[in-house]
Image (tube, rainbow, N blue to C red):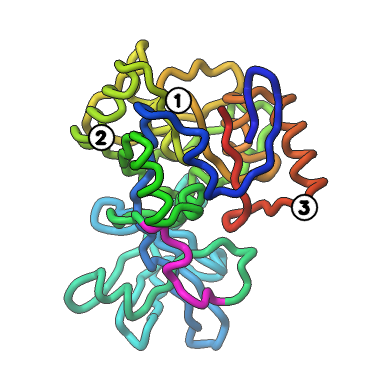
């Protein structure tokens, strides 16, 4: 745990989280669910091929394709014994490809037969249980990656949070490539986040606004929830129900209006995620906390440890 005002650090177990929450606070989580959109197979020549479906695009899908340069427009690929066939289209300005899907019946059922969850590339072996890469409250399908700060929660821990008089609210932001694409330019103002779709229900907005009006804190779980709330918050920090897309890129100097505390994993250099937490807690405080985490062998990456920033 890191305190923004003093830089003080405490080392606890995640199940101790309720001790840091107060009656009247709101805990806000992202209930997006990862789709099995990673298609892997082989070309007719025998070479390996992979198509990662990112999002629908005017009747087609935007996708990452490997090996991209060898797959010319018009190439047709088959996955899952023919459950899904993919016709490769032209490249986009972002370096992705537009592809057309061919399948019988429901696409979701076809993905279950032909696809895999798109776990991060540093996880080299298949998960023993694909549910390990979903939060226990994942409900609304549409993400290509899990909101990993939420992977630490169990149903029992959420019950313990509620028993302290904390409101638990859910927003949806379908995590896309933009969240994890590295910053490759020295001038960060030139980096552009790819837009991701979000939705905030009237019930969740009422819980968040009610907590703030009563003097409680809005405790946000994950950078995706921060970006959602900060995209729609008014000057007083209140939020309005609705949906849309956000490409908000938060860097140091940003004025946070809707986020009072943050639960987040440990992030890698030159990522928008690290820049966001540095904006929230201060670059020097974050660097000091990371140095301590490295000294104590905390785990980074998606299945790593978490940090509560108050």
Coordinates of residue 68 in the picture (x, y in percent): 54, 64
Q: Identify the residue under disc 2.
A: 204
Judge from the rendering whether residue 104 lies leftward or rightward of residue 269; answer left or right: left
Say above or below: 278 vs 34: above
- Crowd around label 3: few <14 · some 14–19 · many ≥20 (10 Å): few
- Upstream in sequence: badge 2 or badge 3: 2
Coordinates of residue 181 in the picture (x, y in percent): 56, 46
Coordinates of residue 309 in the picture (x, y in percent): 58, 31
Of the pair 216 and 283, the residue shown nearer to us: 216
- Crowd around label 2: few <14 · some 14–19 · many ≥20 (10 Å): many
Tell me the quarter of the picture where residue 197 sits.
top left
Judge from the rendering whether residue 305 lies leftward or rightward of residue 166; answer left or right: right
- Upstream in sequence: badge 3 or badge 1: 1
Residue 182, visible in the rendered structure: yes
Residue 91, visible in the rendered structure: no
The answer to whether the residues at label 1 and label 2 have Cβ atoms under 8 Å apart is no
What residue range appears in magenta?
126-136
Q: Secondary structure at mark 1?
A: loop
Q: CA distance from mark 2 to mark 3?
A: 37 Å
Residue displayed at 59% across by 32% down: 277
Coordinates of residue 100 in the picture (x, y in percent): 31, 65
Q: Residue furthest right?
A: 295
Of the pair 275 and 216, the residue shown nearer to us: 216
Residue displayed at 21% across by 37% down: 201
Which quadrant: the C terminus? Answer: top right
Q: CA distance from mark 3 to mark 1?
A: 28 Å
Q: Residue furthest top?
A: 235
Q: Identify the residue under disc 3.
A: 297
**Which secondary structure type mostly characterizes the magenta part of the structure?**
loop
Say above or below: 280 vs 18: above
Q: Identify the residue under disc 1.
A: 259
């Amino acid at each position: 745990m890191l305190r923004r005002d003093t830089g003080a650090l405490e080392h606890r177990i995640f199940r101790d989280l309720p001790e840091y929450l107060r009656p009247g606070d709101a805990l806000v989580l992202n209930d997006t669910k990862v789709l099995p959109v990673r298609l892997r197979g082989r070309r007719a020549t025998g070479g390996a091929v992979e198509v990662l479906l990112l999002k629908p695009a005017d009747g087609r899908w935007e996708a990452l394709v490997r090996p991209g340069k060898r797959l010319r427009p018009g190439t047709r690929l088959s996955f899952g014994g023919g459950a899904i066939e993919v016709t490769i289209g032209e490249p986009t300005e972002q370096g992705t490809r537009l592809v057309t899907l061919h399948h019988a019946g429901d696409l979701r059922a076809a993905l279950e037969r032909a696809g895999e969850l798109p776990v991060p590339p540093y996880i080299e072996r298949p998960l023993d249980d694909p549910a390990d890469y979903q939060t226990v409250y994942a409900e609304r399908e549409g993400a290509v990656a899990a909101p990993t700060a939420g992977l630490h929660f169990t149903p029992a821990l959420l019950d313990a949070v509620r028993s302290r008089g904390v409101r638990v609210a859910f927003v949806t932001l379908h995590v896309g490539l933009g969240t994890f694409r590295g910053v490759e330019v020295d001038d960060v103002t030139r980096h552009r986040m790819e837009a991701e779709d979000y939705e905030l229900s009237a019930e969740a907005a009422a819980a968040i606004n009610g907590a703030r009006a009563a003097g409680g804190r809005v405790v946000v779980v994950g950078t995706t929830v921060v970006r959602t709330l900060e995209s729609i918050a008014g000057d007083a920090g209140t939020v309005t129900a609705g949906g849309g897309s956000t490409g908000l890129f938060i860097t140091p100097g940003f004025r946070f209006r809707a986020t009072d505390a943050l639960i987040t994993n440990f992030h890698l250099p030159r990522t928008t995620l690290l820049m966001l937490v540095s904006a929230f807690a201060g670059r020097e405080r974050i660097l000091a906390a990371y140095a301590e985490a490295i000294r104590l062998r905390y785990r980074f990456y998606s299945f790593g440890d978490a940090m509560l920033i108050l």
